[in-house]
C-alpha cells in the first residue's frame, strides 16, 4: 500500500520561510514524477511545482518561480518544498502528489494517483 505522509507547514509572517516534506512508503513504490499542489478555500487545486526522478528537471508555477524550490532525496523517498519570501496569497493547504509511470503531465492533478494528507500553510500580512 502506497502512502505519502507530509510534514512541515504552519503559520509564518509575510517574507518568512517554511519547508514542507513528503515521504513515500510502500517498498515497491518508486515514484517518478512528484509534485506539490495547493488549494485555497473556495478555489480549485493549483499546480505549484514538480520534479522528475533524476531531480534535473523541475517545473514551477509562475506565481512561485524564484521563491520556491522543489527537491527530492530518492534514497529516502522524500520530496521537499522550500518556500521563501512567502506572501499572504500563498496561504493554502499544500498537498504532495506522486506517480510511478513516467513523464506525465506534471501540471495536472489527474496525472497523480497518490496524494499526501495535506498541510496548512498560513502567511500573515
Image (tube, rainbow, N blue to C red):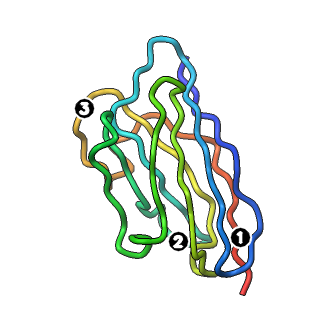
Give the CA distance from mark 3 to mark 1: 33 Å
Residue at mark 2: 43
- Circle 3 residue: 102
Instruction: Examine the image and state in which quarter residue 87 appears.
Output: bottom right
Q: Would you name the residue on which mark 1 appears?
A: 122
Above or below, 90 against 34 in this view is below
Q: Please, which residue is most extreme toward the right here?
A: 11
- Quarter in which the N terminus is drawn: top right
Instruction: Give the CA separation, mark 2 to mark 3.
Output: 28 Å
Position of residue 22 measured from the top left corner of the image (x, y, whole percent): 58, 39
Q: Which quadrant of the view contains residue 66?
A: bottom left
Q: Earlier in the sequence, mark 2 or mark 3?
A: 2
The residue mark sitting in front, 2 or 3, is 3
2 or 1: tag closer to the N-terminus = 2
Q: Is mark 1 on a helix, strand or loop?
A: strand
Local crowd size for mark 2, using a 10 Å CA cut-off: few (<14), some (14–19), many (≥20): few
| Residue 112 drawn above or below residue 9 | above
Query: Which badge, 3 or 1, comes first in the chain's sequence?
Result: 3
Assess disc 1: are there few (<14), some (14-19) or many (≥20) residues with their C-alpha within 10 Å of its C-alpha: many
Amino acid at each position: 500500500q502506497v502512502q505519502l505522509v507530509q510534514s512541515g507547514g504552519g503559520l509564518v509572517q509575510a517574507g518568512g520561510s517554511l519547508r514542507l516534506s513528503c515521504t513515500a512508503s510502500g517498498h515497491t513504490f518508486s515514484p517518478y514524477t512528484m509534485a506539490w499542489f495547493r488549494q485555497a478555500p473556495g478555489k480549485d487545486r493549483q499546480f505549484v511545482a514538480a520534479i522528475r526522478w533524476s531531480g534535473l528537471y523541475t517545473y514551477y508555477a509562475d506565481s512561485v518561480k524564484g521563491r520556491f524550490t522543489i527537491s527530492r532525496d530518492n534514497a529516502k523517498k522524500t520530496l521537499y518544498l522550500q518556500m521563501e519570501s512567502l506572501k499572504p496569497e500563498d496561504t493554502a493547504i499544500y498537498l504532495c502528489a506522486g506517480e510511478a509511470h513516467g513523464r506525465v503531465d506534471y501540471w495536472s492533478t489527474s496525472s497523480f494517483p497518490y496524494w499526501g494528507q495535506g498541510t496548512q500553510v498560513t502567511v500573515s500580512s
